[in-house]
Image: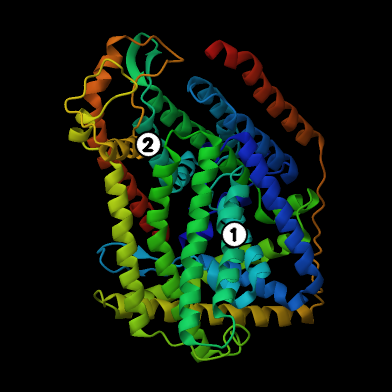
Amino acid sequence: MHHAHIDKFAYQDSAIHRLDSRVKFLVVLVFTAVVISLPRSSLSILACYAIGPFAVLVWAGIPLKFVFKQILLVSPFVIVLALSCPLYDRTPVAVSFGPFSWQSSLGWLRCFVILGKFIVTMLALIGLVSTTRFSDLLAGLQKLGMPRLLTIQLGFLYRYIFVLIDRAHHILLARAGRKLRNLGFKTELKTAASMLGSLFIRSIDTAEHISIAMQARGFDGNWRTLSKLKVRRCDLFFVLTAAVFMSGLYFFVKPILQ
Amino acid sequence: MHMANELLSIPVAAGTLAIAAGSLGFICRKVRQVIAAEKLALMGILGAFVFAAQMVNFQLPAMPGTSGHMVGAVLLAIILGPHLAAIVISSVVIVQCLIFQDGGLLALGCNIINIGLVPSYLGYFLYKTITNGRFSSLKVYIGAMLASVIAMEAGAILVAIQATMSGVLAVPLSTFLITMIGVHFLVGFVEGLVTVTVLAYLQQLRPDIVADSLPGTVRLSKNAVLATLGILAVITGAGLSLLASDLPDGLEWSYAERLDEPGFETVVSNPDSRITAVDDFQSKYSLMPDYSARASKLGDVADGQADLGAGWTSFAGIVGSALTMAVIWLTAWMLRRKQAL
């Protein structure tokens, strides 16, 4: 089943994978903020910023085909909105690129900058998610001050998401096997509601069984894990490199490109 | 509708992140004091249920080829109460961001507010207000329906407001709002229908689950659905005609006076005050009211460019409307695609 493999790369091993999850999370957060605050009319600086996450992804051994497929999958909303920019902002600008120069509009420029920022920040996010196990990320986030209830909630959610998606697949398959044509809205709605209802009931029953089993093993609402998060020397090195990369581009390369 | 990083400015992103984190922390503290340990597993699994439920799709009426799915915020709010529903849906949004990369890290605050917090609380509040008092099946129907539609619209309106406040997009707020409200109206309507039908199903099979929220039998009456469809048709029609009157057509543009270009001669001028009022209204709300060459920041603008603008305006009206339709079509296509995930 394809869903089970969506974060399979998080279970690989590389220098990037071994970095502390808090460090990675904060670096990606700062990186995203820096990229978003870049000017709205300069495309070339974005290309420079893309180098960072690209390097991380390549180093961690994440296949780029997977990365771009993932970006494409979540892009429709952004693409639609970005494409609306040329429609409303038609301030003509002269664009030059190497030996070529042509007339374009500020809207198109904005559109491409939005798409560029989208790709760069997505690269960074995928770089974080596909090199960090979700449980490590949760432990890190809890250390950073996320409420414990939310950590437990996210942990359970992550544990059962694929189980229930599998179950939904079975129900959908059963419907597809019986329903050979469009049944009209009323019947369709009724069928879907029964499917959702039975899925809901099964989820609640599963939850009951799990909580009985967990209480039998002494679960009292707190999660105790063996993992100890520790910031090591390579983590500091990673932070330093990232900081130099981001501030160097921001203070030295950006003024040149503008 | 997931907000993206790129459509936000740093202050808006930081503000919404702070609001979302603050309110989630507050809700978690509140809930933690009253919740039993055995409810923890239930909440987590209902979060997973929301994911699975979004895969269950069904054909929509009147639009062959499209199908809808449920979002589930209002259903959870009705069954679990608003606090737990808010935590469950927010956790779903966080997982969508961190595992499926849907919506960015900086936009997480916006998404938690738009998809998690506002629909849960607003939906619950509306449902409770309407179903207050003596139990009746119709009240449950109207309550769930209104809660779904309005909660969905509130989230959609917030998306438009946040994007406009950030100023990244060039789309005027009114156009953005009309598109978002139009699309989400249908989504909310379907959500409401599914919510009621699922509630009725649950009550038939497992009355113990919904005992607190539904003290009587829910029956989906055909007349109520037909009435809703009628209201929906009227509202959609009114909305469409409003949208249509907003779009300037080429002929009107050539009549109109152009304030941005004093040298432009109107072909026909009509001194009637009503006509001028309508014209004013139209120029205020038209899609491209100030289509003209503004001062450029980046390069030289040839003078001829501004004159060219006059000929392009009527064209822009037509192309603009066609593109707006394309935007709506693409949004629908996107919604379809999302549920195929």
Q: Chain of mark 2?
A: B
Residue designated by label 1: B118
Secondary structure under tag 2 reads helix
Where is residue B286? Give x, y as percent.
Answer: 33, 38
Question: Residue B302, relative to residue B281: is it above or below?
Answer: above
Residue plotted at (25% across, 76% down): A180
Q: In the picture, which quadrant includes the C terminus of chain B? A: bottom left
Q: Nearer the viewer, residue A87 or B104?
A: A87
Q: Quadrant of residue A212?
A: bottom right
Other-residue count near label 1 (Cα within 10 Å), few / some / many at <14 / 14–19 / ≥20: many
Question: Residue B57, relative to residue A5: is it above or below?
Answer: below
Decide which of tag 1 and tag 2 comes sooner along the chain. 1
Q: Nearer the viewer, residue A22 or B167?
A: B167
Both marks 1 and 2 on one chain: yes
What amino acid is found at the position of numbered circle 2 in the picture?
Lys
Q: CA distance from mark 1 to mark 2?
A: 31 Å
Residue plotted at (29% across, 24% down): B258
Residue designated by label 2: B284
Circles 1 and 2: CB atoms closer than 8 Å = no
Where is residue B272? Give x, y as percent.
Answer: 24, 36
Secondary structure under tag 1 reads helix
What amino acid is found at the position of numbered circle 1 in the picture?
Val
Where is residue A179? Give x, y as percent.
Answer: 29, 78
Residue A143 appears left or right of A112: right
Residue plotted at (39% across, 73% down): A172
